[in-house]
Each structure stands twice: as structure tokens, then as C-alpha cells.
Image (cartoon, rainbow, N blue to C red):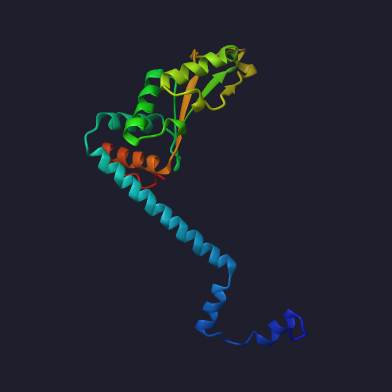
Amino acid sequence: MVGVSLSSVSLWVRDIELTPDAKEALHRRNPARNGEIVRSANLARARERRKVWQDAGREHARCGDPLHHAGCMLYWAEGSKSRTAIQFSNSDPAMVALFVEFLRICYEAPEALIGVRAHLYADHTADQEGIEQFWLDAARLPQSSLRRSIVNRVSKSSKGNRLGRLPYGTCRITFHRAAVVQSIFGAIQEYGGFERPEWP
């Protein structure tokens, strides 16, 4: 604009002391700083939402609902600790059935959003469809709930032998709803009588 290089202008103005207002104006125009402010605000809002959902879970735990109590304890023992998605894995069909019932009744989870994924070994593949149907039947969910199975290959060092063979592998139940996950986390703390601030 003035026909000289930026380095020359920098030399000319380096001794000029900016007023606090001028410094603030420059800071506001800094995209890196603005991005950090937005991120911090988003994180704070997300923390507040999680707290509200966990408080609701604590309130639910005080109602004395045995199914809710059982489902939360199952999740504490066998569930992932994701912030936004329920992932519950087990090899016991009765346990899987109870957990799905817990989601249906206590959280009104639509069956269309509950996923069933079988975790199998290579020797299961001959009857993969039958095993997948076994888990769908156990969970009382339709074929549309089935997600692609995961097949774990047996390592060569094991010589093809698996310890503790599971005839149906394991089943993972998934349900993506952050409010439900956080409600369960709050309820677990209420039932257990402890505080876990580091929980997501």
C-alpha cells in the first residue's frame, strides 16, 4: 500500500507503543486466538451438558428401579467409557438380553438404533449366520439391527487352539446417544456412592 516491504515498515514502527485498546483490537483479529476462544466455549458447553445429563442419571438412581440399577451395574462392569456411545460386550446371552431390556425400558431406546455386532473366531465362520441370528434372538432385535461381524484370527503361535472356547463368540450392543451414556455414568456414581470427576 505504501510501496515498501513489510520488513521496512516493521523497522519504522517497532518503537511505537500500542495502547491497550489497539492491542486488544489486534488480538481480536488473530484467527488462532479466536479459534481457541471458540473451542474453549464449546468445551465448556459440552461439560455443562454432560453434568446436566449425569445429574439426571443420579436422580433416576434415587427412584429405586431394580432394572435401572441392574443395567447400570452391568455397564459399569462390561461397558466402554465412551462419552457419546454405549458399547456393551459379553458372551452371556442372558446378560445381553437384560442389558437390551434396560435400554428399551429405562431409556426408551428405539430398537432401530440399537446395534448388534458378533465378535467371532475363524472357526465360527462356517456357521456365522447362525451365530449372528443367535445374538439377534437373544437381544430380541430384528435383522436390521445386525452390524458387520468381526472375525478374530487365531495366531500361529497358538497352534490353532483357543483357551476358554466360546461357542457363540461374544456380542457387542451399541447405542449412540450421549445423553444416555452420561445419565448412566451419573447413576453409577450415585449407586456406588462415589465421585469420579475424570469420567467423561
**Residue drawn at (51%, 26%) of the image:** 144
- Residue 168 at x, y = what percent? 49, 15
Taking depth in this image into account, of 9 and 115 the one nearest to the observer is: 115
- Give coordinates of residue 71: x percent, y percent: 33, 30
Picture coordinates of residue 66, whole percent (x, y): 25, 29
* 70 versus 6 height, above or below: above
Left or right of 117? Residue 158 is: right
Q: Residue at x 46, y 34 (%)?
A: 113
Q: Quadrant of residue 9?
A: bottom right
Q: Residue at x 64, y 17 (%)?
A: 156
Q: Is residue 160 visible?
A: yes
Picture residue at 36% right of the left edge, 31% below the top: 104
For the image, the number of numbered tags is 0
**Residue 23 placement: quadrant:** bottom right
**Residue 193 in view, yes or no:** no
Answer with the quarter of the image where residue 82 lies: top left
Q: Is residue 120 above or below residue 22?
A: above
Q: Of residues 195 and 93, which is closer to you in this image?
A: 93
Which quadrant is home to the C terminus? top left
Where residue 41 appears, as percent x and y from the top left, is 45, 61
| Quadrant showing the N terminus | bottom right
Q: Is residue 113 left or right of residue 106?
A: right
